[in-house]
Amino acid sequence: MHDVGRFAGRHVLAELHGISPALLDDSDFLRSTLEAAVTEAGATVREVMAHRFAPQGVTVLALLAESHASVHTYPEIGAVFVDVFTCGDRADPEHAVRLLAKALNATSVELSTVLRGEY
């Protein structure tokens, strides 16, 4: 059951390692991969934006009806920081991170979940 206006959410913070530097510098791939992961995890994507840094690295932000998701890459070390926050119980932010890690072929995934609001 979905409670309208329920003040509760899960905030997942993750570090993924062992990723191909080429993938972590490809803003189009990262945009589509983040969008697919959060959508498959039950979130509703409103907008996705990306910025590529010089000489390398990409930040992607997905605005969700449920809140937000972001990635910030470090191609030089094959790593990415991931942040997925979803309100309510429709979307599963942990699943979104696992899907993203799989799509990136990450060899290491460290994640923590913070329950926010009223549980």
Image (cartoon, helix red, strand yellow):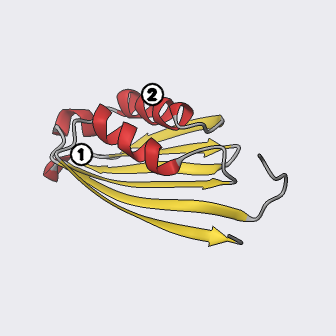
Percent from the top left, x then y, of residue 11?
A: 53, 62
Specify whether residue 10 is in view. Answer: yes
Q: Check disc 2: other Cα within 10 Å, few if <14, some if 14-19, many if 20+.
A: few
Q: Judge by depth and name the residue closer to the eye, 64 or 116.
A: 116
Residue drawn at x 71%, y 72% is 118
10 up-or-down from 61: above or below: below
> Pointer 2: what residue?
32
Percent from the top left, x then y, of residue 33?
A: 41, 31
Residue drawn at x 68%, y 48% is 66
Instruction: Tell me which label, 1 or 2, sits earlier in the chain.
Output: 2
> Pointer 1: what residue?
55
Numbered disc in front, either 1 or 2: 2
69 up-or-down from 44: above or below: below
Percent from the top left, x then y, of residue 53?
A: 34, 46
Specify whether residue 25 is in view. Answer: no
Mark 1 falls on what kind of element?
loop
